[in-house]
Image (cartoon, helix red, strand yellow):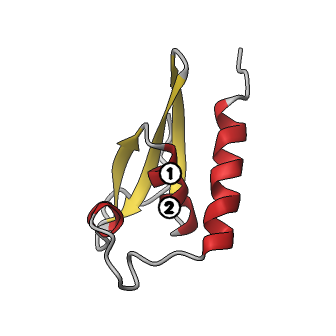
């Protein structure tokens, strides 16, 4: 698979957590791949090396990295749920 981002500036982050994935989408992280494992979907993201979104999300940091707009977050959840149910051949 061809890389569509600068590997020196981005790291790959995998998550099966739909809500964390929605958070990353709102933060502007690029979905690089999705993998179905039974009824679960694993999301792969390109995350900027200079950001610690994982810590910001799980520690509920009240700063620029931890904040997302509620409406955009809700829409990202809906979009990712749709993506989870898309059948591929």
Which quadrant of the figure has residue 75?
Answer: bottom right
Question: Mark 1: which secondary structure?
Answer: helix
Which quadrant of the figure has residue 66?
Answer: bottom left
Is the C terminus in the top left, top right, bottom left or bottom right quadrant? top right
Residue drawn at x 47%, y 46% as measured from the top left:
3
Eyeballing the image, is 41 above or below 59?
above
Q: Is residue 9 visible?
A: no
Residue drawn at x 73%, y 21% as measured from the top left:
87
Q: Mark 2 and mark 1 in contact (Cβ < 8 Å)?
A: yes
Residue in front for this viewpoint, 12 or 52:
52
Is 31 displayed left or right of 14 in the figure?
right
Q: Is residue 72 visible?
A: yes
Residue drawn at x 57%, y 66% as measured from the top left:
26
Residue ID for mark 2: 23
Is 62 displayed left or right of 55 in the figure?
right
- Estimate the spatial distance between the alpha carbons at disc 1 and disc 2, rounded to whole Å: 6 Å
Eyeballing the image, is 66 above or below 8?
below
The label number, if any, that marks residue 19 in the structure image: 1
Say few, some or many: other residues with alpha carbon within 10 Å of mark 2 (under 14 / 14 to 19 / 20 or more): many
């Amino acid at each position: 698979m061809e890389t569509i981002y600068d590997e020196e500036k981005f790291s790959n982050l995998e998550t099966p957590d739909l809500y964390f994935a929605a958070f990353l989408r709102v933060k502007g992280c690029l979905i690089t791949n999705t993998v179905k494992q039974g009824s679960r979907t694993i999301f792969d993201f390109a995350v900027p090396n200079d950001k610690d979104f994982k810590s910001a999300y799980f520690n509920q940091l009240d700063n620029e990295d931890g904040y997302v707009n509620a409406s955009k977050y809700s829409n990202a959840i809906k979009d990712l749920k749709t993506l989870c149910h898309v059948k591929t051949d």
